[in-house]
Amino acid sequence: MSTASRKKTAASTPDAADRHDLIRVHGARVNNLKDVSVELPKRRLTVFTGVSGSGKSSLVFDTIAAESRRLINETYSAFVQGFMPTLARPEVDVLEGLTTAIIVDQQRLGADPRSTVGTATDAHAMLRILFSRLGDPHIGPPSAFSFNVPSVRASGAITVERGEKSKAVKKSFSRAGGMCPRCEGMGSVTDLDLTQLYDAAKSLDEGALTVPGYKAGGWNYRLYSESGFYPADKPIGKFTKRELHDFLYHEPTRMKIAGINMTYEGLIPRIQKSMLAKDKEAMQPHIREFVDRAVTFTACPDCGGTRLAEPARTSRIDGVSIADACAMQISDLAAWVRGVDDPSVAPLLAALGHNLDSFVEIGLGYLSLDRPSGTLSGGESQRVKMIRQLGSSLTDVTYVFDEPTIGLHPHDIQRMNELLLQLRDKGNTVLVVEHKPELIAIADHVVDLGPGAGAGGGTVCFEGTVAELRRSDTVTGRHLDDRAKVKDKVRTPTGTLELRGADTHNLQNVDVDIPLGVLVVVTGVAGSGKSSLVHGSIPVGAGVVSIDQSGIRGSRRSNPATYTGLLEPIRKAFAKANGVKPALFSANSEGACPNCNGLGVVYTDLAMMAGVATPCEECEGKGFEASVLQYRLGGRDISEVLAMPVTEAEEFFGTGDARTPAAHTVLGRLADVGLGYLTIGQPLTTLSGGERQRLKLATHMADKGGVYVLDEPTAGLHLADVEQLLGLLDGLVDSGKSVIVVEHHQAVMAHADWIIDLGPGAGHDGGRVVFEGTPEDLVAGRATVTGRHLAEYVGA
């Protein structure tokens, strides 16, 4: 064969390595997926759509991304794997063509008070190096500028043994740290408001303590009333200096009270250990309310809230300290870094400048590096994680995003689209779970799951291009081009909530009247000051119910019944019908199966290999003792009731022998927010982000308040679900409530009675009210960014 012939044959036969251009999934059964099989093109942008709870995250995160992570972990030695999280193989028959998966999800960045935007990225580390090299006066290495490193000094003698001789050698050690010694790098100091702990006009015998759990007659109370350190019949306000010290600050001391050995200590250290040392979000509501009342957080008087020791605050570059740099808006800090000209640190300046420019490019230029990471929204957290990927030289990897447009104004979504396309055009596979039509429109390939949610979902309804999706008869296809109309007639306010001089974060002394008795939407570009106005300026107290974006905490033992309080009336109804204790009907209490402790499954730990979960043989996966299942209510045992969907349970507890009004009311609220398909005993860990948000909304609907404040309630909602949400908001307003919504979704804006638009930009370019009025006036004027996008949306 000639050389030319060989070349022709080689050209016509593709290389075997080039044939792996698909990610193949066959028989996926994770969570609610029903033997799902899909083929996803590599080096393309694939968007997964479907109603909330249809199985999108189960397919993308819990199957494709999870298996990629597991296979990568298996390349490490068994020793290294012992230190890594163990991942089980997803329930799937075949997974082929996987590449390394980089997951950029909405999990909040750590809420550790020491974590900031700067420490969560590389920016703060590079700034510390910069100041350690160029700062004047020079104070030490990069650790000298870290508020997480305390200064340490030590000296003493050590014994050095050489052969049979030993010799004492004097040694000294010091480490320069930047931590403020007063607040220990926290930036704030806490103080307890004593008036919230006790009534000084009363004696302990008269019930002076007002701390939750310190009820007169209880052991906590008797510890103080019978301690003998001070008279229990004397008003606390008349205690001597010594008596008050013993009451509030006494060190731990063993003593006998009523013949029982107990440890007495002052009230303040006891409360600090039992309440203030705990995670606030994990507290019971009444404890959290007490902590909010009793604890005051003030900026540290020594460091002024900068967290840094004095040497770190006084070392400067061109008159700017590291505290000043971290407090700057990142877009301004990027400009300052470009102005620093020193050839000795040129590579560092280039890397730092690129990192800061990435913040601006992704729409986070309004943040500052000293912003606590726990205060970022889910959308902001996800975009902070994206920053690491923007300058990456990696190609042929799979990027997995979970609704990257959450928290973005329509004006910012175009920028996000460009970033996703950049990642794809570098030769990467981009998988996105998304509901927004603006992002779906740029997809190369669409996978639509459904048709419903929960047990009604878990199948592939459509695979193909966006144009084909529009022509399909799926729920997403039918709603993709939905456009809400601006209200013809708006409600008349019943009053106003006056805000004067609001200056939280970037708000610029804002005066605004929020109408009551109507649906008010607060909008504006990301970082314009919406949450600062609504959550930071509206007085939180009686009558205000605030539903923010903080996540729901819950283990595999938690479920909708336990989270909403639904289980309590159900247990009592079972107990009353059978004449036994309510505790028997809880899988976390006396009724739990002793073999699996109420979990329904038995976990076997296999060290560095994935643990195995097998259904409990004793209870057959039901989680209850066999004796408990003999007790029935309306012909059903407790395990059968917890296996019911919300709609079936609502009917069950609404009539007949099982009629339980308290349970029926809670189930009605779950159905109202669109969770009728959810099983009431389903573990919270299996719920999607949208489902968790609506579960939280359903719980707060029981709160007695006149003003409801919601923060982006459309997050995680499908286009079809937004209509139901609008109906729910209308129902709240029509029942006499005032509803204030922070929102970017144009359908919610169009449905509002009144719009307050903040801007015109983000950070210090925002913080002003640029429009107040009806949606119709906003569209007609087109004077703001929001007005122009809303006009385009409604086709005006």
Image (spheres, rainbow, N blue to C red):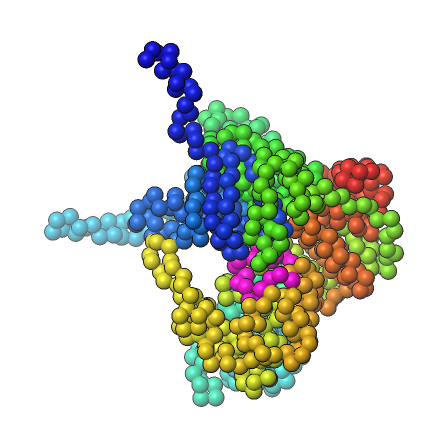
Above-or-below relation of 479 to 228: above
How far across and down, in percent of the image, does residue 333 sit? 59, 35
User: Is 255 inside the magenta-drawn segment?
Assistant: no
Residue 21 in view: yes
Q: Quadrant of residue 670?
A: bottom right
Residue 538 in view: no
State the residue lying farthest toward the left.
Answer: 164
Say which quadrant the C terminus sits in: top right
Q: Quadrant of residue 290?
A: bottom right
Above-or-below relation of 727 to 319: below
Above-or-below relation of 23 to 661: above
In the image: residue 768, left or right of residue 404: right
Magenta span covers which residues? Answer: 676-697
How far across and down, in percent of the image, does residue 67 sit? 43, 47
Say which quadrant the N terminus sits in: top left
How far across and down, in percent of the image, does residue 673 sit? 68, 60
Residue at position x 56%, y 52% in the image: 458
| Front residue of this view, candidates 88 and 251 | 88
| Front residue of this view, candidates 27 and 546 | 27
In the image: residue 752, left or right of residue 123: right
Residue at position x 46%, y 26% in the image: 344
In the image: residue 68, left or right of residue 354: left
How far across and down, in percent of the image, does residue 232 sit? 58, 85
Residue at position x 76%, y 40% in the image: 793
| Front residue of this view, candidates 124 and 198 | 124
Count of picture labels: 0
Residue at position x 60%, y 62% in the image: 678
